[in-house]
Image (cartoon, rainbow, N blue to C red):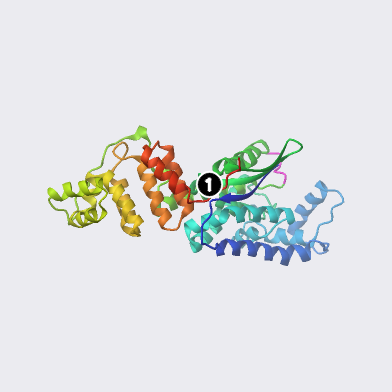
Amino acid sequence: MFLPIGDSPNPERFTPWVNYGLIAANVVVFFLTYIPLADLRADVVPTEALRWLRQITAANPGYVPSQYDVFTYVNGYKPGAPEIRDLFSAMFLHAGWGHLLGNMLFLWIYGDNVEHRLGRMKYLFVYLLTGVAATMGFALLNVGSTVPMIGASGAISGVLGMYFIMFPHNVVKVFTFFFPFIFGVYPFNARLVLGFYIVVQNIFPAVFAAGQGGGGVAYGAHIGGFVAGVIVALIAERLTGAVPRAAMPGLGTQRGPVRARPGPQAVSWGTTEDGFREAVAGGDRSTAFRHLLEMSTLDVAERMPGEALVVARWLAEEDRLIQASEMVRRVLRIHRPPTIDQAEVYYTMGVIRLKQGQPTSAYQHFMDALDFGPRPETEERIRKALTSINVYRRPN
Protein backbone atom coordinates (compact mmCIF):
# COMPACT_ATOMS: atom_id res chain seq x y z
CA MET A 1 0.00 0.00 0.00
CA PHE A 2 1.22 3.49 -0.89
CA LEU A 3 -0.42 6.53 0.71
CA PRO A 4 0.94 10.09 0.35
CA ILE A 5 0.68 11.92 3.67
CA GLY A 6 2.58 15.16 3.10
CA ASP A 7 5.01 17.12 0.95
CA SER A 8 7.89 19.57 1.29
CA PRO A 9 8.91 22.33 0.97
CA ASN A 10 5.71 24.28 1.57
CA PRO A 11 4.96 28.02 1.33
CA GLU A 12 6.11 29.96 4.37
CA ARG A 13 3.87 32.52 6.07
CA PHE A 14 1.03 31.69 3.70
CA THR A 15 -2.44 30.42 4.58
CA PRO A 16 -4.16 28.67 1.63
CA TRP A 17 -7.63 29.99 2.39
CA VAL A 18 -9.11 28.95 -0.95
CA ASN A 19 -7.82 25.41 -0.60
CA TYR A 20 -9.19 25.22 2.94
CA GLY A 21 -12.48 26.63 1.64
CA LEU A 22 -12.72 23.94 -1.04
CA ILE A 23 -12.05 21.22 1.52
CA ALA A 24 -14.67 22.74 3.84
CA ALA A 25 -17.22 23.00 1.01
CA ASN A 26 -16.80 19.32 0.14
CA VAL A 27 -17.12 18.27 3.77
CA VAL A 28 -20.17 20.48 4.42
CA VAL A 29 -21.96 19.19 1.31
CA PHE A 30 -21.19 15.62 2.39
CA PHE A 31 -22.69 16.21 5.84
CA LEU A 32 -25.75 17.94 4.40
CA THR A 33 -26.48 15.26 1.81
CA TYR A 34 -24.83 11.88 2.46
CA ILE A 35 -25.27 11.78 6.22
CA PRO A 36 -29.07 12.37 6.28
CA LEU A 37 -29.90 10.53 3.02
CA ALA A 38 -27.63 7.48 2.89
CA ASP A 39 -29.64 5.47 5.43
CA LEU A 40 -33.07 6.35 4.03
CA ARG A 41 -34.65 3.92 1.62
CA ALA A 42 -35.56 5.32 -1.79
CA ASP A 43 -39.33 4.95 -1.80
CA VAL A 44 -39.91 7.42 -4.62
CA VAL A 45 -37.59 7.02 -7.59
CA PRO A 46 -37.63 9.20 -10.75
CA THR A 47 -38.40 7.17 -13.83
CA GLU A 48 -35.09 8.09 -15.49
CA ALA A 49 -33.16 6.73 -12.50
CA LEU A 50 -34.83 3.29 -12.45
CA ARG A 51 -32.52 1.71 -15.02
CA TRP A 52 -29.37 2.76 -13.15
CA LEU A 53 -30.71 1.62 -9.76
CA ARG A 54 -31.60 -1.75 -11.26
CA GLN A 55 -28.01 -2.06 -12.47
CA ILE A 56 -26.79 -1.36 -8.92
CA THR A 57 -29.06 -3.96 -7.34
CA ALA A 58 -28.19 -6.52 -10.03
CA ALA A 59 -24.48 -6.06 -9.35
CA ASN A 60 -25.00 -6.05 -5.57
CA PRO A 61 -27.72 -8.56 -4.61
CA GLY A 62 -29.50 -7.54 -1.45
CA TYR A 63 -28.52 -3.87 -1.75
CA VAL A 64 -31.39 -1.47 -1.12
CA PRO A 65 -31.04 1.86 -3.00
CA SER A 66 -31.08 4.90 -0.74
CA GLN A 67 -32.35 8.41 -1.18
CA TYR A 68 -28.73 9.47 -1.57
CA ASP A 69 -28.42 7.19 -4.61
CA VAL A 70 -31.33 9.04 -6.16
CA PHE A 71 -29.84 12.39 -5.16
CA THR A 72 -26.50 11.57 -6.80
CA TYR A 73 -28.27 10.44 -9.95
CA VAL A 74 -30.13 13.71 -10.21
CA ASN A 75 -27.10 15.89 -9.41
CA GLY A 76 -24.24 13.82 -10.84
CA TYR A 77 -22.98 14.36 -14.38
CA LYS A 78 -24.42 11.95 -16.96
CA PRO A 79 -22.81 12.01 -20.45
CA GLY A 80 -26.04 10.72 -21.96
CA ALA A 81 -28.09 13.50 -20.35
CA PRO A 82 -25.66 16.41 -19.84
CA GLU A 83 -26.60 19.54 -17.91
CA ILE A 84 -24.35 22.51 -17.18
CA ARG A 85 -25.44 22.59 -13.55
CA ASP A 86 -24.32 18.99 -13.07
CA LEU A 87 -20.80 19.87 -14.23
CA PHE A 88 -20.31 21.75 -10.97
CA SER A 89 -22.65 20.00 -8.53
CA ALA A 90 -20.99 16.66 -9.28
CA MET A 91 -17.61 18.03 -8.09
CA PHE A 92 -18.87 18.36 -4.51
CA LEU A 93 -20.62 14.99 -4.10
CA HIS A 94 -18.97 11.82 -2.82
CA ALA A 95 -19.96 8.18 -2.66
CA GLY A 96 -18.90 7.57 0.95
CA TRP A 97 -16.41 8.29 3.70
CA GLY A 98 -13.46 6.67 1.95
CA HIS A 99 -14.15 8.57 -1.26
CA LEU A 100 -14.34 11.90 0.58
CA LEU A 101 -11.33 11.43 2.88
CA GLY A 102 -9.06 10.18 0.10
CA ASN A 103 -9.88 13.15 -2.11
CA MET A 104 -9.51 15.69 0.68
CA LEU A 105 -6.15 14.24 1.72
CA PHE A 106 -4.78 14.75 -1.80
CA LEU A 107 -6.24 18.26 -1.99
CA TRP A 108 -4.72 19.15 1.39
CA ILE A 109 -1.26 17.86 0.40
CA TYR A 110 -0.92 19.41 -3.04
CA GLY A 111 -3.35 22.32 -3.16
CA ASP A 112 -1.54 24.81 -0.91
CA ASN A 113 1.58 24.98 -3.09
CA VAL A 114 -0.45 25.45 -6.27
CA GLU A 115 -2.63 28.13 -4.67
CA HIS A 116 0.47 29.98 -3.52
CA ARG A 117 1.98 29.86 -7.01
CA LEU A 118 -1.17 30.89 -8.91
CA GLY A 119 -2.80 33.26 -6.41
CA ARG A 120 -6.09 32.71 -4.61
CA MET A 121 -8.72 33.63 -7.18
CA LYS A 122 -6.80 32.17 -10.11
CA TYR A 123 -6.44 28.94 -8.17
CA LEU A 124 -10.19 28.78 -7.56
CA PHE A 125 -10.93 29.45 -11.22
CA VAL A 126 -8.41 26.86 -12.42
CA TYR A 127 -9.69 24.28 -9.92
CA LEU A 128 -13.20 24.59 -11.37
CA LEU A 129 -11.86 24.74 -14.94
CA THR A 130 -9.86 21.53 -14.61
CA GLY A 131 -12.86 19.94 -12.88
CA VAL A 132 -14.94 20.67 -15.98
CA ALA A 133 -12.14 19.34 -18.21
CA ALA A 134 -12.05 16.17 -16.10
CA THR A 135 -15.77 15.69 -16.57
CA MET A 136 -15.33 16.06 -20.33
CA GLY A 137 -12.63 13.39 -20.17
CA PHE A 138 -15.08 11.08 -18.41
CA ALA A 139 -17.72 11.84 -21.05
CA LEU A 140 -15.34 10.97 -23.90
CA LEU A 141 -14.80 7.49 -22.48
CA ASN A 142 -18.48 6.99 -21.63
CA VAL A 143 -20.39 8.48 -24.55
CA GLY A 144 -24.15 8.11 -24.11
CA SER A 145 -23.89 6.65 -20.62
CA THR A 146 -26.47 7.61 -18.00
CA VAL A 147 -24.30 6.41 -15.12
CA PRO A 148 -23.66 9.53 -13.03
CA MET A 149 -20.14 10.67 -12.20
CA ILE A 150 -19.57 12.33 -8.82
CA GLY A 151 -16.55 13.36 -6.79
CA ALA A 152 -13.85 16.01 -6.57
CA SER A 153 -11.11 13.71 -7.86
CA GLY A 154 -11.26 15.11 -11.41
CA ALA A 155 -10.63 18.67 -10.24
CA ILE A 156 -8.03 17.43 -7.75
CA SER A 157 -6.28 15.58 -10.59
CA GLY A 158 -6.03 18.98 -12.25
CA VAL A 159 -4.25 20.25 -9.14
CA LEU A 160 -1.90 17.24 -9.32
CA GLY A 161 -1.15 17.99 -12.97
CA MET A 162 -0.22 21.57 -12.08
CA TYR A 163 1.91 20.38 -9.16
CA PHE A 164 3.69 17.93 -11.51
CA ILE A 165 4.88 20.82 -13.69
CA MET A 166 5.40 23.51 -11.06
CA PHE A 167 7.19 21.54 -8.34
CA PRO A 168 9.26 18.79 -10.02
CA HIS A 169 11.84 18.64 -7.23
CA ASN A 170 9.51 18.64 -4.24
CA VAL A 171 9.53 15.67 -1.89
CA VAL A 172 6.36 13.70 -1.10
CA LYS A 173 6.19 11.68 2.11
CA VAL A 174 4.57 8.32 1.39
CA PHE A 175 3.34 5.86 3.97
CA THR A 176 4.40 2.47 2.62
CA PHE A 177 3.08 -0.83 3.96
CA PHE A 178 3.90 -4.29 2.64
CA PHE A 179 3.40 -6.67 5.53
CA PRO A 180 5.64 -7.96 6.97
CA PHE A 181 8.61 -6.60 5.00
CA ILE A 182 8.15 -2.83 4.66
CA PHE A 183 6.46 -0.46 7.04
CA GLY A 184 7.15 3.27 7.40
CA VAL A 185 7.18 6.71 5.83
CA TYR A 186 9.58 7.26 2.94
CA PRO A 187 10.41 10.35 0.86
CA PHE A 188 9.95 10.19 -2.92
CA ASN A 189 10.39 12.73 -5.68
CA ALA A 190 7.04 14.41 -6.43
CA ARG A 191 7.11 13.59 -10.13
CA LEU A 192 7.73 9.93 -9.36
CA VAL A 193 4.69 9.81 -7.06
CA LEU A 194 2.41 11.74 -9.43
CA GLY A 195 3.68 9.82 -12.45
CA PHE A 196 2.78 6.58 -10.67
CA TYR A 197 -0.67 8.02 -9.93
CA ILE A 198 -1.51 9.00 -13.48
CA VAL A 199 0.15 6.14 -15.37
CA VAL A 200 -0.16 3.07 -13.14
CA GLN A 201 -3.34 3.97 -11.29
CA ASN A 202 -5.27 5.55 -14.14
CA ILE A 203 -3.93 5.20 -17.69
CA PHE A 204 -3.17 1.48 -17.43
CA PRO A 205 -6.55 0.62 -15.84
CA ALA A 206 -8.38 2.82 -18.36
CA VAL A 207 -6.73 0.95 -21.24
CA PHE A 208 -7.01 -2.58 -19.89
CA ALA A 209 -10.48 -2.12 -18.41
CA ALA A 210 -11.94 -0.70 -21.62
CA GLY A 211 -15.17 -2.42 -22.37
CA GLN A 212 -15.13 -4.25 -19.03
CA GLY A 213 -16.41 -1.46 -16.82
CA GLY A 214 -14.31 0.77 -14.67
CA GLY A 215 -15.06 -0.73 -11.29
CA GLY A 216 -16.71 2.53 -10.27
CA VAL A 217 -13.53 4.58 -10.85
CA ALA A 218 -13.76 7.49 -13.30
CA TYR A 219 -10.37 7.00 -14.97
CA GLY A 220 -11.28 9.30 -17.83
CA ALA A 221 -11.99 12.12 -15.36
CA HIS A 222 -8.66 11.64 -13.61
CA ILE A 223 -6.73 11.61 -16.89
CA GLY A 224 -8.65 14.57 -18.33
CA GLY A 225 -8.16 16.64 -15.18
CA PHE A 226 -4.45 15.82 -14.94
CA VAL A 227 -3.79 16.72 -18.58
CA ALA A 228 -5.73 19.97 -18.19
CA GLY A 229 -3.69 20.80 -15.10
CA VAL A 230 -0.42 20.19 -16.96
CA ILE A 231 -1.51 22.50 -19.78
CA VAL A 232 -2.63 25.24 -17.39
CA ALA A 233 0.65 25.02 -15.45
CA LEU A 234 2.77 25.32 -18.59
CA ILE A 235 0.81 28.41 -19.63
CA ALA A 236 0.94 29.91 -16.13
CA GLU A 237 4.70 29.37 -15.84
CA ARG A 238 5.22 31.19 -19.12
CA LEU A 239 3.00 34.12 -18.17
CA THR A 240 4.42 34.60 -14.67
CA GLY A 241 8.03 34.67 -15.82
CA ALA A 242 9.13 31.44 -14.18
CA VAL A 243 11.73 29.36 -15.98
CA PRO A 244 10.52 25.75 -16.14
CA ARG A 245 12.87 23.25 -17.74
CA ALA A 246 10.49 22.92 -20.69
CA ALA A 247 10.92 26.64 -21.42
CA MET A 248 14.71 26.45 -21.62
CA PRO A 249 16.16 25.29 -24.94
CA GLY A 250 18.20 22.13 -24.78
CA LEU A 251 21.82 21.99 -25.83
CA GLY A 252 20.74 20.39 -29.09
CA THR A 253 18.75 23.46 -30.16
CA GLN A 254 21.47 26.08 -30.20
CA ARG A 255 20.62 29.07 -32.34
CA GLY A 256 23.03 31.68 -31.09
CA PRO A 257 22.06 35.09 -29.75
CA VAL A 258 19.12 36.89 -31.27
CA ARG A 259 19.92 40.48 -32.14
CA ALA A 260 17.54 43.05 -30.78
CA ARG A 261 17.18 46.71 -31.64
CA PRO A 262 18.62 49.00 -28.97
CA GLY A 263 16.15 50.92 -26.88
CA PRO A 264 15.71 54.67 -27.16
CA GLN A 265 18.10 55.23 -24.20
CA ALA A 266 21.04 53.44 -25.84
CA VAL A 267 24.29 55.43 -25.79
CA SER A 268 27.84 55.05 -27.03
CA TRP A 269 29.53 52.98 -24.36
CA GLY A 270 33.30 53.28 -24.38
CA THR A 271 34.63 53.70 -20.86
CA THR A 272 31.16 53.17 -19.35
CA GLU A 273 31.08 49.58 -20.62
CA ASP A 274 34.61 48.91 -19.43
CA GLY A 275 33.83 50.42 -16.04
CA PHE A 276 30.70 48.30 -15.72
CA ARG A 277 32.56 45.09 -16.53
CA GLU A 278 35.35 45.95 -14.09
CA ALA A 279 32.84 46.79 -11.34
CA VAL A 280 31.01 43.49 -11.79
CA ALA A 281 34.25 41.51 -11.90
CA GLY A 282 35.45 43.25 -8.75
CA GLY A 283 32.17 42.86 -6.89
CA ASP A 284 31.69 46.63 -6.67
CA ARG A 285 27.91 46.89 -6.59
CA SER A 286 27.53 50.63 -6.16
CA THR A 287 29.77 51.38 -9.15
CA ALA A 288 28.04 48.75 -11.27
CA PHE A 289 24.62 50.20 -10.42
CA ARG A 290 25.86 53.71 -11.24
CA HIS A 291 27.08 52.60 -14.66
CA LEU A 292 23.86 50.68 -15.22
CA LEU A 293 21.95 53.97 -14.99
CA GLU A 294 24.00 55.28 -17.90
CA MET A 295 23.38 52.30 -20.16
CA SER A 296 20.41 50.60 -21.82
CA THR A 297 19.27 47.53 -19.89
CA LEU A 298 18.57 45.89 -23.24
CA ASP A 299 22.13 46.48 -24.42
CA VAL A 300 23.55 45.12 -21.16
CA ALA A 301 21.45 41.96 -21.50
CA GLU A 302 22.45 41.56 -25.16
CA ARG A 303 26.19 42.26 -24.93
CA MET A 304 27.00 41.02 -21.44
CA PRO A 305 24.56 38.28 -20.38
CA GLY A 306 26.92 36.89 -17.75
CA GLU A 307 27.37 40.27 -16.07
CA ALA A 308 23.63 40.93 -16.41
CA LEU A 309 22.82 37.79 -14.39
CA VAL A 310 25.29 38.80 -11.66
CA VAL A 311 23.73 42.26 -11.45
CA ALA A 312 20.24 40.72 -11.40
CA ARG A 313 21.24 38.73 -8.31
CA TRP A 314 22.62 41.85 -6.67
CA LEU A 315 19.40 43.71 -7.42
CA ALA A 316 17.36 40.87 -5.90
CA GLU A 317 19.50 40.80 -2.76
CA GLU A 318 18.78 44.52 -2.32
CA ASP A 319 15.03 43.91 -2.82
CA ARG A 320 14.93 45.58 -6.22
CA LEU A 321 12.98 42.57 -7.44
CA ILE A 322 11.18 44.14 -10.41
CA GLN A 323 14.48 45.29 -11.93
CA ALA A 324 16.05 41.92 -11.22
CA SER A 325 13.23 40.00 -12.91
CA GLU A 326 13.27 42.32 -15.91
CA MET A 327 17.02 41.84 -16.32
CA VAL A 328 16.69 38.04 -16.37
CA ARG A 329 13.70 38.17 -18.75
CA ARG A 330 15.70 40.29 -21.18
CA VAL A 331 18.63 37.86 -21.09
CA LEU A 332 16.31 34.92 -21.77
CA ARG A 333 14.54 36.78 -24.56
CA ILE A 334 17.78 37.44 -26.43
CA HIS A 335 20.09 34.49 -25.74
CA ARG A 336 20.16 30.74 -26.19
CA PRO A 337 22.69 28.17 -24.95
CA PRO A 338 25.67 28.10 -25.10
CA THR A 339 25.71 31.91 -25.06
CA ILE A 340 24.32 31.78 -21.53
CA ASP A 341 25.09 29.42 -18.67
CA GLN A 342 21.82 27.65 -17.86
CA ALA A 343 22.97 26.84 -14.33
CA GLU A 344 23.53 30.56 -13.71
CA VAL A 345 20.07 31.40 -15.11
CA TYR A 346 18.31 28.93 -12.82
CA TYR A 347 20.38 29.99 -9.83
CA THR A 348 19.53 33.64 -10.48
CA MET A 349 15.82 32.87 -10.76
CA GLY A 350 16.07 30.93 -7.51
CA VAL A 351 17.58 33.93 -5.72
CA ILE A 352 14.79 36.16 -7.02
CA ARG A 353 12.05 33.72 -6.04
CA LEU A 354 13.56 33.29 -2.58
CA LYS A 355 13.56 37.05 -2.04
CA GLN A 356 9.94 37.15 -3.24
CA GLY A 357 8.98 34.76 -0.45
CA GLN A 358 8.46 31.78 -2.75
CA PRO A 359 10.72 29.05 -1.28
CA THR A 360 8.98 26.24 -3.16
CA SER A 361 9.63 27.91 -6.52
CA ALA A 362 13.18 28.86 -5.47
CA TYR A 363 13.84 25.23 -4.53
CA GLN A 364 12.85 24.05 -8.02
CA HIS A 365 15.18 26.55 -9.70
CA PHE A 366 18.12 25.71 -7.44
CA MET A 367 17.69 21.99 -8.10
CA ASP A 368 17.46 22.64 -11.85
CA ALA A 369 20.67 24.66 -11.63
CA LEU A 370 22.45 21.67 -10.06
CA ASP A 371 21.25 19.49 -12.95
CA PHE A 372 23.19 21.67 -15.42
CA GLY A 373 26.59 21.17 -13.77
CA PRO A 374 27.32 24.61 -12.30
CA ARG A 375 30.82 25.88 -11.69
CA PRO A 376 32.18 24.94 -8.22
CA GLU A 377 31.69 28.43 -6.79
CA THR A 378 28.12 28.57 -8.11
CA GLU A 379 27.37 25.10 -6.77
CA GLU A 380 28.57 26.20 -3.34
CA ARG A 381 26.23 29.20 -3.41
CA ILE A 382 23.33 27.01 -4.54
CA ARG A 383 23.83 24.48 -1.76
CA LYS A 384 24.12 27.27 0.78
CA ALA A 385 20.80 28.70 -0.44
CA LEU A 386 19.18 25.27 -0.24
CA THR A 387 20.05 24.97 3.43
CA SER A 388 17.65 27.82 4.13
CA ILE A 389 14.77 25.84 2.62
CA ASN A 390 13.46 23.03 4.81
CA VAL A 391 12.89 19.86 2.82
CA TYR A 392 11.74 16.59 4.34
CA ARG A 393 14.50 14.03 4.27
CA ARG A 394 14.59 10.60 5.79
CA PRO A 395 17.05 10.56 8.73
CA ASN A 396 20.17 8.46 8.24
Give the residue pinned by disc 1.
Answer: 170
In the displayed orientation, state which residue is furthest to the top. Answer: 252
Residue 284 rendering spot, x and y as whole percentages: 25, 51
The amino acid pointed to by label 1 is: Asn
Name the foreground residue: 240 vs 180.
180
Position of 96 with respect to 323 (left or right) is right
Q: Residues within 10 Å of mark 1 (few under 14, many from 20)?
A: many
In the displayed orientation, state which residue is furthest to the right. Answer: 62
Q: Residue 355, located in which quarter of the rendered image?
A: bottom left
Residue 96 rendering spot, x and y as whole percentages: 74, 56
Position of 217 with respect to 296 (left or right) is right
- Location of the N terminus by quadrant is top right
Name the foreground residue: 305 vs 318.
318
Report the span colored magenta: 211-215
Q: Is residue 179 above or below residue 97?
A: above
Residue 381 lies in magenta, yes or no? no
Q: Is residue 207 above or below residue 121?
A: above
Position of 137 with respect to 359 (left or right) is right
What kind of element bears circle 1? loop
- Location of the C terminus by quadrant is top right
- Count how many numbered circles sit on residues in the image: 1
What main secondary structure does the magenta stretch of the protein show? loop
Residue 214 lies in magenta, yes or no? yes
Residue 285 rendering spot, x and y as whole percentages: 26, 53
Residue 357 seen in the current view: yes
Name the foreground residue: 375 vs 135.
375
The residue under the point 55% across, 57% down is: 112
The residue under the point 43% across, 51% down is: 237
Residue 241 seen in the current view: no
The residue under the point 34% across, 34% down is: 253
